[in-house]
Image (spheres, rainbow, N blue to C red):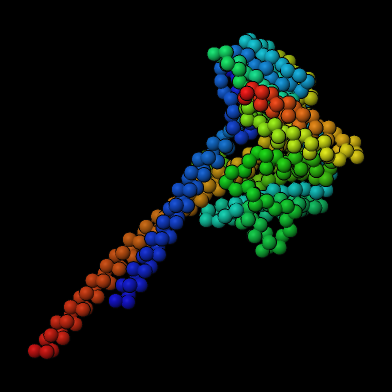
Amino acid sequence: MAKAKALDKRRKSIKNIRKITRTMELVSTAQFRRAMERAIAAKSYSQRLVQLVGDLARSGHNTSHPLLSSRESRGRAALFILTANRGMCGGYNAGILRAGLAQLEALRREYDEVELYVSGKRGLSFLRYRKIEVARAFTEFDHKPTYEEVLAVATDVLTRYQIGELDRVDVAYSEFISLSKQQATTTTLLPLTSLAQVDQDASRDEIEYEFLPSASSILEEVVPNAFKVQLFKCFLDAAVSEQIARMMAMKAATDNADQMISALTTTYNRARQSQITNEIIEVISGASALQ
Amino acid sequence: MKCSVVTPETTVVDAEVQFVVAPLYDGEYGIGENHSPAVGRLGAGELRLTLMDGTVEHWYVEGGFLEVLDNSVSLLTNRAARLETLDVGASRAALSRAQALASNSPELADVKESAVALARSQLRAAQKGARIKK
């Protein structure tokens, strides 16, 4: 009897685990939808900003800006690493940390000092274990980073860049490319060279804009905004990718639990059957002994 | 004429309008049908949209840009809210916080000045929102 009972107990506990993984899958599916909508909204905003810079460039104005050109000095760099607050999402955190550490090594070779800005408990505990110092830690950006929260961080970093405390700002995060593809990457946010590259593409016709007050004043406003929005987009991408990773991981876990349950059910039934057979044999042999 | 208001978080407005009055950095700017292409810097203040049925919507926008092209007006702004939803008390508190900022160096004085100006425009918008509600 003992074996069948143990098997049944195990099957029950796997059923409970399956319930949990299934619920987590559903929760992250719901959160993923919401995060996705926000990521799309931010994308349309940043696309329009980039378009605006392109328009400024095509109207024949000088689009040089201190934030767009790279610097000679190699004093201090900052690296953002955006991980998740929770695990249970497959190789998501590990991938980002691998990309982040590689970038950290590269930056350390080039710059005198590198500051780490880390978001997410997973990344923080990993770096603590590796005894790597973190300049600033964030745990408040969960599945729903708001623009206001990111803005505070972005403004702070931007000011330090402008007064020369920082010479470069990089981000290691998981880029959301499509539903089936997310990739842990690192990009450089300051200097904003990506924005300067867009300038050269002149696919649209030249339009005579009226600038209020002037093209240079608008550029002065656009560029810092573009940085803030790009940082925000990194956070949103990270949130979307995290939910997708968790969805996949939990779906795989649920499927595995299903398989284990059916395998255990078969073994349990066999054990029960052989137990009954044994008992019958015992009864029969007991009865025949009495004759 | 189409008008859209986009913040980094959502698209707030996407509607057909007759007339738009937008708060530029130095005053209001009206845009009617067939306006010439323009790019402008927004300040903080009230945005009025006259919809196709003649009703007027009041919004509060905070900084960003305005682009007019081919009968479509798009505003990219950091923050957008209905004027009626602004809280006069909170705006007043923000103003006194801004006025309490230190200004003992030129940089800090600049920061304070812009914070006070921003809080003033927000308070003005909130007060107008409260009047509209009544």
Q: Is residue A207 above or below residue B125?
A: above
The image quadrant where one finds the N terminus of chain B is top right
* A168 left or right, relative to A30: right
Extreme top residue here?
A: B34
Q: Nearer the viewer, residue A286 or A174?
A: A286
In the picture provided, is A286 more to the left or to the right than A126?
A: left
**Residue sticking out furthest to the left:** A291
Q: Position of residue A121 (x, y in %)?
A: 63, 56
Residue in the foreground of this view, choosing between A221 and A112: A221
Residue at position x 61%, y 35% in the image: B9
Figure check: A53 above or below A157? above
Which of the pair B53/B41 is nearer the observer? Answer: B53
- The single residue placed furthest to the bottom in the displayed view is A290
Q: Return the residue nearer the eye: A183 or B130.
A: B130
Q: Which quarter of the rendering shows the C terminus of chain B?
A: top right
Residue at 55% across, 56% down: A87
Can residue B14 be spotted in the picture?
A: yes
Question: Residue A263 occupies which quadrant of the picture?
Answer: bottom left
Residue beneath the point at 83% across and 39% down: B100
Q: Residue A77, how many percent across, how many down? A: 77, 48
Residue B114 position by quadrant: top right
Above-or-below relation of B16 to B116: above
- Residue drawn at (75%, 54%) of the image: A135
Number of numbered discs on residues: 0
Instruction: Describe residue B47's horizontal placement relative to residue B111 as left or right.
Output: left
